Amino acid sequence: MNQDLTLSATLNSDFDRDGFVAINPLFTPEEMTAINAEVAWFLKEGVSKMPADRVYLEDRDDPTSIKQLQKLFEYSPFFHSMMFDGPIRRIASAVMGDEAVPVNMQFFNKPAGIGQPTPPHQDGYYFHLDPPLAVTGWLALEPVDEENGCIHYVGGSHRGDGFRPHGFTSVLGFSQGMTDFGTDEDKAGTVACPGGPGTFLMHHAKTIHWAGPNSSPTRSRRALGFIYYAARAKVDVAAKETYQMTLDARLKSEARI
Ligand SMILES: O=C(O)CCC(=O)C(=O)O
């Protein structure tokens, strides 16, 4: 782990100003080799043990076209340790100024040539938290750039009041996208986050972010996501359940899960 950057004196001030931080890289090449080996093992052996509603495919007829996996830490001690014991949770606590409660660990892929764009959104719109204090970490497992769909943030967008309007999208795994995205301010504030394997991003639940499609015919775009809620953020359980039921019914009726 890159201790110096993790413990950087400007970590909190950068996060407060921009709504995200980029640590480039967080993990050494040797650590990334071990992480990628676990991911490769999991894709081969672990996915078949997961319930179907935790496995999202880009192409429903192609089981190799995995685009998202949910709750990885429940299936692998290695992933559990990354989520609960490692530097990622410490960074989450530091930037939130609160205990970081592990909620979800995801695999995100944009398969070569067919990976869809990630619509502009604010994670907190999905979370239903009061106060809306949560973070998402994002670890590149391989080189990410404009061609294969790196993450883009609108710097400082976490400081806006509430959430911008969202509506249903057709993108599996990102059911809600902003309906008013693309203002001059959005465009001026946009920052692309390319990087190599081990590049680590962490964003506030109100920070607007998006990613392009994977237009590379040969390269995938693999990453791991880590969601932590602040201990003081409480879930509005009724609102969240209503939202989840509506979403599940919609996805099933459209035969997308
Ligand atoms: O990997 C992606 O393209 C999107 C990730 C994302 O939006 C998130 O983790 O909140």
Image: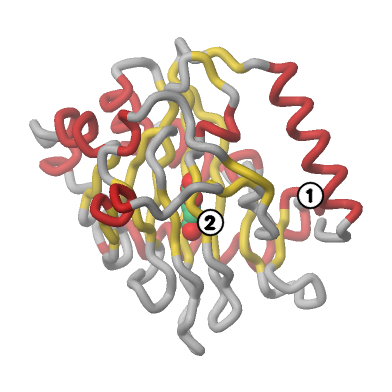
SS at circle 1? helix
Residue 119's tag is 2
Instruction: Depth check: give the residue in front, 59 or 224.
Output: 59
Q: Which of the two residues, 54 or 163, is positioned nearer the viewer here?
A: 163
Image quadrant where residue 238 sits: top right
Q: Position of residue 193 (x, y in %)?
A: 28, 59
Residue type indicated by callout 1: Asp
Q: Amino acid at mark 2?
A: Pro
The residue at 45%/51% (across/down) is 181
Image mark for residue 161: none
Pointer 1: what residue?
Answer: 53
The residue that appears at 58% across and 41% down in the rendered structure is: 166
Q: x, y (%) of residue 160? A: 35, 29
Side (left or right) of 99 relative to 247: left
Is 12 on the left-hand or right-hand side of 151? left
Mark 2 secondary-structure assignment: strand
Q: Which residue shows up at 78% across the image and 26% down it?
A: 242
Do the CB atoms of the residues marked 2 and 1 lie less than 8 Å apart? no
Of the two numbered discs 2 and 1 in the rendering, the one whose residue sits closer to the viewer = 2
Percent of width and height locating residue 69:
64, 53
- In space, the residues marked 2 and 1 are separated at their CA atoms by 21 Å
